[in-house]
Amino acid sequence: MSNLIDFQVDPTSYRHWRVTYEGEVANLYMDVDEDGGLFDGYQLKLNSYDLGVDIELADVVQRMRFEHPEIKAVILQSGKDRVFCAGANIKMLGNAAHAHKVNFCKFTNETRNTFEAAGAESGQHYIAAINGTCAGGGYELALACDYIMLTDDGSAAVALPEVPLLAVLPGTGGLTRLTDKRKIRRDRADVFCSLVEGIKGARAKSWNLVDEVITNSKFAETVEQRAGEFAANSTRAASDAGIELNPLYRSFEENGDVKYSSVNVTVDRTGRSATISIEGPDSAVPVSLTDLVEQGSDTWMLRCARELDDALLHLRLNELELGNLIFTTRGDATAVLAHESFLMTHKDHWLAHEILLYWKRVLKRIDMTSRSLIALIEPGSCFAGVLAEILFAVDRTYMAEGEFEDNDHGEATITLGQSNFGLYPMANNLTRLQTRFLSDDGLVEAVQNHIGQPLNSDKSDELELVTYCFDDIDWEDEIRIFLEERSNFSPDALTGMEANLRFAGPETMETRIFGRLTAWQNWIFQRPNAVGETGALQRYGTGVRGEYDKKRV
Amino acid sequence: MSNLIDFQVDPTSYRHWRVTYEGEVANLYMDVDEDGGLFDGYQLKLNSYDLGVDIELADVVQRMRFEHPEIKAVILQSGKDRVFCAGANIKMLGNAAHAHKVNFCKFTNETRNTFEAAGAESGQHYIAAINGTCAGGGYELALACDYIMLTDDGSAAVALPEVPLLAVLPGTGGLTRLTDKRKIRRDRADVFCSLVEGIKGARAKSWNLVDEVITNSKFAETVEQRAGEFAANSTRAASDAGIELNPLYRSFEENGDVKYSSVNVTVDRTGRSATISIEGPDSAVPVSLTDLVEQGSDTWMLRCARELDDALLHLRLNELELGNLIFTTRGDATAVLAHESFLMTHKDHWLAHEILLYWKRVLKRIDMTSRSLIALIEPGSCFAGVLAEILFAVDRTYMAEGEFEDNDHGEATITLGQSNFGLYPMANNLTRLQTRFLSDDGLVEAVQNHIGQPLNSDKSDELELVTYCFDDIDWEDEIRIFLEERSNFSPDALTGMEANLRFAGPETMETRIFGRLTAWQNWIFQRPNAVGETGALQRYGTGVRGEYDKKRV
């Protein structure tokens, strides 16, 4: 198990980040340990990062929302002198397998999005305070912040040198945030992305690459002042103390299974499948907000979200050959709805609000997981409310029809909650049901009329909620045949197909990052001009430029 | 020159298509000549197609709009028995270089889009009448039609078998049109795209894969009836006789230059650049609509559009190493505006309307050309109205400042017309100026206040219309340095960068096809699972399945 990439870290184990808290403002210092790379063969110089650095960052952002609800502004800054961040480590990228590159970029993208979500949804605003070199992924970190401040010391600059230097794209949202977030004129964006040395001072401000340029002597003071202003203008309610995010209840088994308290991952290597079983609530609905806070990270809704999130990340990075992810649930649908309803009723309370927002992120993590996703709705399952949302995130749903032998749970049902109609929008800003029924709003309304009712297979089929219904006789065979067939398809073709079918309808900056930008970057990550023997990523640092096939494609 | 792919064909030379005209309805028969492939090494069996087949199809669609304005409905059908179209030829795809695959798909996509544009903009509606096998690119042809009719003979089916059979995507718009045009539930789309044999009969209709299923005996009659209905409901005005699209005035020179009557392509192989020089009007503005029709395909606005379009396609397919396309113009800005104004004034006349719509398509062809695009605004140039639009399509514009020695044209200017504010929207449905100024509508308005005024470099710079201005002393050096730098970048990184920067703002079905779908397809076209020795495209037809690396990326 020692080679597993572990997404669970905590502040006592951070190697690359420090956080200090002063009232409503947090100072977040990036101070990467050169020798702390996740893999061998590279040093993390100049605050460059690898997945390990980003796992810690994701943890910081997550804990900020749960453990430090008093924080309204986060100053993202460097712990090093005259260097903010040099971006993703190039040697790491050069050595990494294609799949790791792609998964690394996806995770870093998801984490950048959480900066923006924290500001927009929770009034925790990220401010980038750039004190020196800020290149590539370093500037993309800044671009994900709500406000960018640059010191004017004659050398500090922002840069996206990927194209001229590395023959790849600024793929962690860089190109998309230039055009869509900061709305930079595209010829200027073209110029900026061609300049290895980047842009500094007044020009950086006038092109809107940064929000403010400040003389070096006044930099620290002005940053503090702006953080205070963001905190003062934050929509975040007055704060309570936070809760602690306790270590997960988790064990890795020899055979690859992973057991959590409310989630179990069972691995079938022959079938190239993993089953993610979610257990419905095993504890009581909080009786009060005080009780909710006391339950803290043990409360079922939060515990289940954390466990599911960790399971998804583990499967993505550590189990590349398990192409089918099968979601099942077991438990009491009424209890699921009761837990969720408690949070919805109290969603003005910071913790209830944060737990629901976390589910929104976890559900998006499912949407973005490039495996074939299947849900099995069996007798005894509890696909209700938040768990029913999974049914509309997956590629196909199979529902058991009628009663099953040796199963005393009666027939399988789905129970929708109010939450399925707006609480957990996808990256395209539609609900999953709206995306499913893009053809006809009447279908969404028809479903909405059945909130709270257990819908059996006939009714679910009629309401177009499921792909197929099979009875006890056919159930196992049909699913086995489908999984076998799916396992025989090309994983790449499935990745491309799913990335196109899952996000129908409108596009947003977020879908554009994961769709257009990521797809082009992945293409480039396959091209000899980037990754071939004489490609720029391989040649980087040797003093010899990449040699390129000059044919345009 | 004999190996050049030539985009100029005419009905007398068609090998693969026949058209008959009956009143307001055209019957368009696909009847591919098996031995008529553009390259050696494959036979075009079962109405499968290669680029040569598609070049003829593009010509049909284009001529329909100019030579047959009386047509309001086009029945796209097969000239063969029990087979509609088997899609792109797999052996051709397997043999083709990556760059050819990508360019082939781009051109076919552009042609599919012209079906939809003909219906939406000109009331010429395409109806697919499917009499048998309709698979892959064959069904994608149908998906681009306004109405899909399928015979119910027990075997005729529609299918997108790319993923299971070939390990690639239905990349000619297939996936996007399933979700965004036909709004098919995504789990059904997933099922459909996994079925080699496709879907037929009532299920094809109930899933909205086709609009109508008709028993075989009534098929021909019903198709005719529907065509009549589409024609009757067409918004197209009562028709005049068409004009003839004469052969282009074109000569290919030994050194690669191409000379047309109003466009010249000059090749600089060392600099990996081609200059596309557009000559302003050399003939008088039509004095009347009768005069316009008499000028026919010789009228400057139409002639110039056809020549520019041909030049772009030639450079895309035949000159892969020319990474920089430099646009220049020469002539009288007032004359350009006068020619364009005449058409705008008379845009209720079918021919004036069609010429303007053609410019819209040609400008989109520029947007979609994956080369670095540069415009040079020199003394004596005529970037006005429709030609000024090119300035906002390219990646960068360089403008001459002040008078130039040895040039008696005075200072360079840009003159905007009303046309720059809505007549030629991009694929994202915004004007190019709106896309440029995504940050601020005030900037568009500011520019709009200067319609018809020659704007010198100071004014153009102030209005943010150009990237850089240089005077006589710096002009040549600056441009030379930029072009050299650009030529040294990785062509792939530039392709990815430009594809992301050019299409800021909203996405449409069209941008999604060229952005998300195409980018994923291009990625897959690089993956060993598709194109490697044991990949599905290579193995196709051998009776042995592709062997796949099962790692998910």
Image (cartoon, coloured by chain):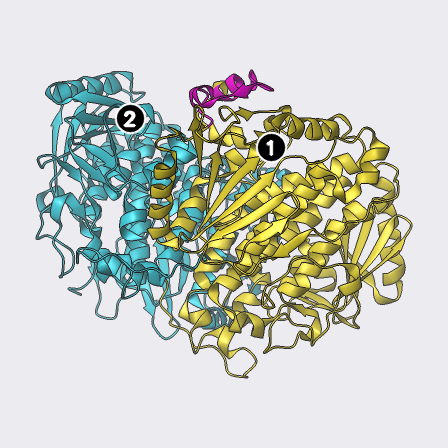
Chain colours: A cyan, B yellow
Residue pointed to by mark 1: B331
Q: Is residue A369 visible?
A: no
Q: Chain of mark 1?
A: B
Residues at marks 1 and 2, CA–CA distance in whole angstroms: 36 Å
Answer with the quarter of the image where residue B398 lies: top left
Q: Residue at x 62, y 34 (%)?
A: B424
Q: x, y percentage for residue B331? A: 60, 32
Query: In which quadrant will I find the N terminus of chain A?
Result: bottom left
Q: Is residue A255 above or below residue A540?
A: below
Residue B382 shows which numbered tag? none
Q: Of residues B2 and A202, which is closer to you in this image?
A: B2
Badge 1 crowding class, 10 Å Cα cut-off, few under 14, some 14 to 19, many 20 or more, is some
Say which element carries label 2: helix
Left or right: B75 with respect to B281?
A: right
Answer with the quarter of the image where residue B139 lies: bottom right
Q: x, y percentage for residue B15? A: 75, 68
Residue mark closest to the camera, 1 vs 2: 1
Residue A203 shows which numbered tag? 2
Magenta span of residues: B443-465
Q: Residue at x 26, y 38 (%)?
A: A159
Q: x, y percentage for residue B79? A: 80, 68
